[in-house]
Image (cartoon, rainbow, N blue to C red):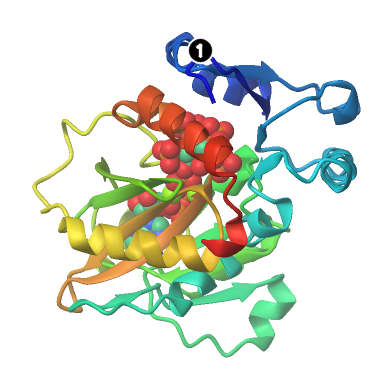
Amino acid sequence: MSASQRYRIGYALEPKKVKTFILPSLVDHAARHGVVLVPIDPALPLIDQAPFHCILHKLYDPNWIQNLHEFTSKNPTTVIVDPPDQIQSLRNRISMLDAVNRVRIPGEFDLGVPKQVAIRDSDGLNKKNLDLKFPAIAKPEAADGAAASHEMFVVFNAGGLEKIMKENKSPMVVQEFVKHGGAVFKVYVVGDHHVKCVKRRSLPDILAEDEGDSDGGVLPFSRISNSNEAGDVNEVEMPPREVVEEVARGLRKELKLRLFNFDIIRDFCKNGKYVVIDINYFPGYAKMPDYESVFTDFLLDVVQNQYNPHQL
Ligand SMILES: O=P(O)(O)O[C@@H]1[C@@H](OP(=O)(O)O)[C@H](OP(=O)(O)O)[C@H](O)[C@H](OP(=O)(O)O)[C@H]1OP(=O)(O)O
Ligand SMILES: Nc1ncnc2c1ncn2[C@@H]1O[C@H](COP(=O)(O)OP(=O)(O)O)[C@@H](O)[C@H]1O
Ligand SMILES: [Mg+2]
Ligand SMILES: [Mg+2]
């Protein structure tokens, strides 16, 4: 294929995501390498907007999924990044971490997830014999991209948990708080070849004394690590490259996804064991260094090698 070959990559994203991800610097870089990024109107049949060598998407509306299914059944050579069925496991905070438990690490380090339990309502809470230590973090079970899915609570006691379950009608996941030194590592994965780890500010380590600052045993917080400023993050040491790559490789294989990031911390009470606390589909890649060239290389790899997620 000649260097001037134009590959058409359709993208179906929320307007907010288009603003933060489809930046002119990406569109220009991609175009210089023969990759044309084309906006998709998810409400119109894909067949009328084709052809596409590849479709990128982060939309969950059932009509869109149906549109995509109908298109792929007639156009099996268009690569879908990623298939909706595969993305589904990341839309729930229990199933997303199941993948971590399936990862087998040949190396010399421990990997796990926080001890956690799903509580569907306040009746469920009464029935459950909670075998969890406080402080804990309560998170909405649904990771559906809504602002509310990032609204969380530090919980200091059983009374606090009861208060949350009464006030919030939606199912929650309660995890033991892991003492990790106030820094979280975000590992961005793009296809088979690119893995980038960055350090972000996290919740500071919570002490039993902090209960005094809480409202009835509860402290709300949201999007604590969602900033690009690493400047004021403390001195916690970055995880070694081999660890980051090994976990990324394992998760890529288990999730059968090409675009995701995961949040990993170190449990200071368990010898620095690595603990994955969150996995996000198609995160904010524009914050990643050199995202324009990384993404363009990924798209070229996808369309030139037509690789199938089941072979990942
Ligand atoms: O908005 P951004 O660029 O900060 O990206 C968000 C991600 O931030 P990160 O790259 O991990 O720092 C963010 O990651 P966290 O959950 O904050 O760890 C999510 O991936 C979020 O998507 P959603 O709201 O869960 O669907 C991402 O939001 P969308 O851009 O997909 O709406
Ligand atoms: N089990 C935990 N122990 C300690 N801190 C946690 C734990 N779970 C989450 N956190 C803190 O809360 C932040 C948000 O939690 P996360 O599950 O990543 O939600 P979101 O999807 O909104 O990013 C994390 O970046 C980290 O600072
Ligand atoms: Mg997170
Ligand atoms: Mg998340």
Q: Nearer the viewer, residue 83 or 230?
A: 83
Q: Is residue 133 left or right of residue 96?
A: left
Q: Secondary structure at mark 1?
A: helix
**Total residue callouts:** 1
Residue 265 place in picture, x, y as percent:
28, 60
Locate residue 236, reporting x and y percent. Answer: 12, 52
Crowd band around label 1 with a 10 angstrom C-alpha radius: few (<14), some (14–19), many (20+):
some
- Percent x, y of residue 27: 51, 13
Q: Is residue 121 above or below residue 213?
A: below
Position of residue 175 measured from the top left corner of the image (x, y, whole percent): 45, 70
Residue at the limit of the structure toward the front, as seen here: 1
Q: Is residue 237 left or right of residue 263?
A: left
Quadrant including the N terminus: top right
**Residue at point 34%, 49% (across, down):** 187
Q: Amino acid at mark 1?
A: Ala
Q: Is residue 193 left or right of residue 130?
A: left
Res 270 → quadrant: bottom left
Q: Which residue is mark 1?
A: 31
| Picture residue at 51% right of the left edge, 21% below the top | 20
Q: Report the residue at 44% width, 31% height from top.
A: 295
> Which residue is drawn at the image coordinates 65% and 40% (left, top)?
146
The residue nearer to you, when weighing 145 against 255, is: 255
Up the image or down, 251 lies above or below 111; here it is: above
Residue 220 seen anywhere in this rendered image of the structure: no
**Quick check: 136 left or right of 231?**
right
| Residue 306, above or below 168 | above
